[in-house]
Amino acid sequence: MNINVDDVVSYDGYSSRNTVTQPNERWRLVFKRWGSVVYSTPYTNDVPDYQKQGYWRGAR
């Protein structure tokens, strides 16, 4: 089986977000089969800080 993870988006937004830093807005996908990890993607890039609406888009 092949799974392409070629377009992902991380997003965060709220009214006072432009005044804070959140250094770990990253994630990854973990694929398991019967409880065992068979593959995990690399972590995404962090969502930019100090913006009312921040996002990162790319491939994993």
Image (spheres, rainbow, N blue to C red):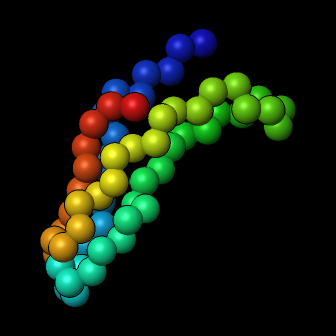
From the top left corner, tell me how far across and down residue 57 is, in percent. Answer: 25, 43
Left or right, residue 32 beside residue 11: right
| Residue sitting at x 33%, y 31% | 59
From the top left corner, tell me how far across and down residue 23 is, in percent. Answer: 38, 65
Q: Say if 38 sits above or below 13 in the image.
A: above
Q: Nearer the viewer, residue 42 or 37?
A: 42
Q: Say if 19 sits above or below 42 in the image.
A: below
Residue lying at the far right in this picture: please name it: 34
| Residue sitting at x 51%, y 33% | 41
Q: Give residue 21's quadrant in the image.
A: bottom left
Q: Say if 35 sits above or below 24 in the image.
A: above
Residue lying at the far bottom in this picture: please name it: 16
| Residue sitting at x 47%, y 50% | 27
Left or right, residue 46 beside residue 26: left
| Residue sitting at x 23%, y 60% | 48
Q: Nearer the viewer, residue 56 or 32?
A: 56
Q: Quadrant of the C terminus?
A: top left
From the top left corner, tell me how far across and down residue 51 is, in percent. Answer: 16, 71
Residue lying at the far top in this picture: please name it: 1
Q: Is residue 14 visible?
A: no
From the top left corner, tell me how far across and down residue 24 is, in percent. Answer: 43, 62
